[in-house]
Amino acid sequence: MLNDMRHRIQFQQKKEKTRLPVDGDNGWETVVECWAKAEGLNGAEYYAAAAIQKEHTIKFTIRHREDIDEHMRILFKGKTYEIESILPNHSRLHFLTVRAKAVK
């Protein structure tokens, strides 16, 4: 599983509004950067998501962490993804599966 974790992703959370905005400041800050396995949905998952949402969804597999939640977003290859769910990986207990959809 570790050999498949070839992609670097960043988890970001909203900044607290305690200071004045700066040019180029998008209101998000990176709190976690880690290696991940990134894979698109396949089979029935893909067709169900495409029919209902018409969105690009990716499953990221990462090492288990306690410091991420559904209120964060992911940066991957220059694109932003909104986290839909964070689930334990039942076949590998030390990993999490994060399902996220592309933000337009």
Image (cartoon, helix red, strand yellow):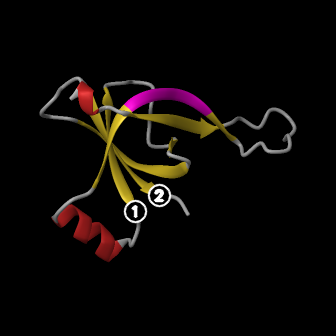
Which of the two residues, 62 or 88, is positioned nearer the viewer here?
62
Which stretch is magenta? Answer: 30-35
Furthest toward the bottom, the residue is 51
Q: Which residue is mark 1?
A: 56
Please tell me which of labels 1 and 2 falls first in the chain. Answer: 1
Circle 2 — which element? strand
**Main SS category, magenta section:** strand
Quadrant of residue 60 in the image? top left
Q: Amino acid at mark 2?
A: Ala
Residue at 68% x, 36% y: name it: 15
51 vs 93, left or right, is: right
The reply, left or right, for residue 6 in relation to residue 29 is left
Residue type beneath disc 1: His
Give the class, few, some or many, for how many residues have Cα within 10 Å of label 1's Cα (few <14, many ≥20).
some
Question: CA gap, disc 1 to disc 2?
Answer: 5 Å
Residue drawn at x 39%, y 73% is 54
Which quadrant: the C terminus? bottom right
Label 2, on which residue?
A: 102
Task: Judge whether residue 33 is colored magenta.
Answer: yes
